[in-house]
Amino acid sequence: MDCDDRRSTVGALSIDLRTRSVVYRGVSVELTPTEFRILELLSSHPEWVYTSAEIADACLDCGGSTDSIIVHISNLRAKLARAAGGPSPIETARGFGYRLSRSSAKSLSTAQFTDSAEALGDNLRANGRFSEAAAAYQQALDSIDADDRLTLASLHLKAAEVAVERQLPMEAISYNLDAETILRATDITGHEEQLDDVLVQRAWIRCHAGDLQDAYDDCTDLLRRLDGSGTAKQRIRLHGCMAMSLLAMHRFVVTPETLDHAEQTYNAWADSGDLEEAVFPEWLLGTTLLWSGNITGGEQRLAEALRLSEELGERSLVPLILVSLGVAARRRGDARLAEKIGMRLLSETDERERLPGHAGAAHGLLCWATWRDGDVDKAAEEGQAALEGEELIPMFPFWWLALAPLIAITLRPSHLGDAVGYARYMLDPSQQLLPPELSKALATACSAWDASDDSRALGALEQAVRAGRAEGYT
């Protein structure tokens, strides 16, 4: 390392300690104060491994959590990698901590650039930065040797996965069809499973696009054709797709068939022992158990999913895990835990690409927690933040997280119209099916309001608030 009082240089990385600026491979990199302090620490002794605790002690303000180091390091890596169009110089010493590599000055061949762009896409996707991951995969596709058909098809599949995460089904199906075309024009002897991966992915795309029955039928046909010969990953995805299709078709009422597919998803992973596939089966089984009424079993699986996501650096499902854990906290009537989960969920949505519902769900949890604490003004503020920050759209079926407590908050004659409007949203067919007593009371309120019977509408909503309290709706 070249160092004076103002600047340190490690390979292609230059840090100006006076201006607090960073240049990597000739590109200026904008960092937060915490990210700069972490990079300054790592650069002080290149190749030294620093634990998360050591980094937290040196770089975080008083009270900072070592858990947040994972997020800061991930963001720092992504910024450096974007600047270079290749890998970040920060490496993980698995089980120990992080180090700054001196090898950042090496130039990249075309093949190395493709590999680096793909690795960057994988990292960004794991951290929920789906738009940036899509751009990285496109860089890899633009640079790859067209004769490397198997890798080319694999990149198309990864680009399709990110398009699914971004809720762009037409883009996803385009990449998926391109992958199939490439493979069918290639001698894939010994690589037939890659073509099966294309068909498995297509069923997933249909599920996310809302073609639930078609997705379910495609998975059934594929499982029958594979007849036990498919890979563990294929079985995980097929049974997982079937469980999720059934959950959505039945508006998150768990049937025995749904639970069976969730369990088979989990068992396929457990039989393989592949940690890279661990988070999704844990989340799916935990969520399914929760919706079936097994709160304790669901929480155990969800807590394990959260632990694994942090340990493995696979954080793309963290918002969904937190939403389910927040629901469990509300089912138990635990306002403190719901508030804690809501705050973490809000932090997660600030650290990644915002997808519809996640920030709204966070504010919904905070709305309910503050309502239960008796802080009506704060609860109303959180409820409005949920509604203003995100649109009420069908792709997020849990708007009751914010709407149900908002009904209780606005339950007075002068705001009766607002409360009835929230009730209508909760009853929308796109939303989770509510308990019968709650659903009936909300429907009665809407009918009474339409008939200009304000007194009856008010009474029905009061009944809905009472009916929803036991299960954490209100």
Image (tube, grey):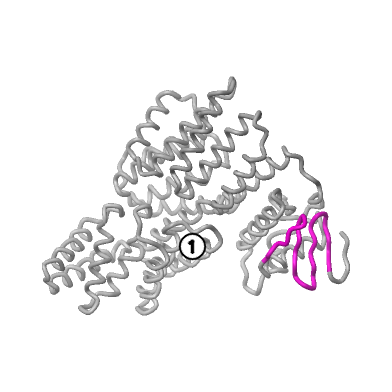
Q: Is residue 17 magenta?
A: yes
- Of residues 398 and 428, the one nearer the viewer is 428
Q: Residue at x 49, y 67 (%)?
A: 343
- Quadrant, the N terminus: bottom right
Q: Nearer the viewer, residue 386 or 143?
A: 143
Span shown in magenta: 7-31
Give left or right: position of 167 versus 18.
left
Residue 187 percent across, percent down from the top left: 59, 20
Dominant secondary structure, magenta = strand
Between 151 and 175, the residue placed more toward the observer is 175
Residue 97 at x, y percent in the picture: 71, 55
Left or right: residue 240 compared with residue 460: right
Q: Is residue 351 visible?
A: yes
Q: Position of residue 445 (x, y in %)?
A: 17, 66
Q: Quadrant of the C terminus?
A: bottom left
Q: Is residue 428 left or right of residue 58?
A: left
Q: Residue at x 37, y 69 (%)?
A: 368
Residue carrying label 1: 345
Q: Residue at x 56, y 54 (%)?
A: 129
Q: Amino acid at mark 1?
A: Leu
Q: Residue 11 lies in magenta, yes or no?
A: yes
